[in-house]
């Protein structure tokens, strides 16, 4: 059970639901970033810090690309 947090968008005290899958992080990314969704306004944010996850998502995407692009390059060019 998630504790109540203040939604950064609508400011309501809500019990957010965990986000299971996202386009940017698959199933792993939202777990790593404690990504949750506000049941009132559907804003998505960090359930642990109560802050928007935008910057963390950008970093996650860049790191993921940096890690996987050599692998993709290797697969395509061998
Ligand atoms: Zn909200």
Image (cartoon, grey):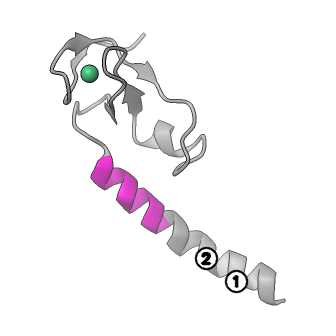
Above-or-below relation of 60 to 78: above
The verdict on residue 56 being magenta is yes
Dot 1 crowding, Cα within 10 Å, few <14, some 14–19, many 20+? few
Q: Give the image quadrant in which the ligand numbered 1 is located.
A: top left
Point out residue 28 in the picture as x, y percentages from the top left corner: 57, 43
Where does the magenta region start and end? 54-63
Residue at 43% from the left image edge and 10% from the top image edge: 1
Q: Is mark 1 on a helix, strand or loop?
A: helix
What residue appears at the point 31 percent right and 49 percent down from the top-left corner? 54
Q: Which of 31 and 43 is in front in this view?
A: 43
* Residue found at the far left of this picture: 11
Q: In which quarter of the image is residue 22?
A: top right
Residue 59, by quadrant, is bottom left
Question: Residues under labels 1 and 2: Cα distance?
Answer: 6 Å
Residue 5: image tag = none
Residue drawn 33% across the image and 12% down it: 15
**Residue 52 part of the magenta segment:** no
- Residue that badge 1 annotates: 73
Query: Observer-nearest residue: 71 or 24?
Result: 24
**Label 2: few (<14), some or many (≥20) within 10 Å?**
few
Residue 12 falls in image quadrant: top left
As drawn, 64 above or below 69: above
Q: Where 29 falls versus 41 (above or below)?
A: below
Q: Residue pushed farthest front?
A: 41
Do the residues bearing badges 1 and 2 touch, measured as CB atoms within 8 Å? Answer: yes
Q: Which mark is residue 69?
A: 2
For label 2, the SS is helix
Rendered location of residue 23, percent (x, y): 55, 47
């Amino acid at each position: 059970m998630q504790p109540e947090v203040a939604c950064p968008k609508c400011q309501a005290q809500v019990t957010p639901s965990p986000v299971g899958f996202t386009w940017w992080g698959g199933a792993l990314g939202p777990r790593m970033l404690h990504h949750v969704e506000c049941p009132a306004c559907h804003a998505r944010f960090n359930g642990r810090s109560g802050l928007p996850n935008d910057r963390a998502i950008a970093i996650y995407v860049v790191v993921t690309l940096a890690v996987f692009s050599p692998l993709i390059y290797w697969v395509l060019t061998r």
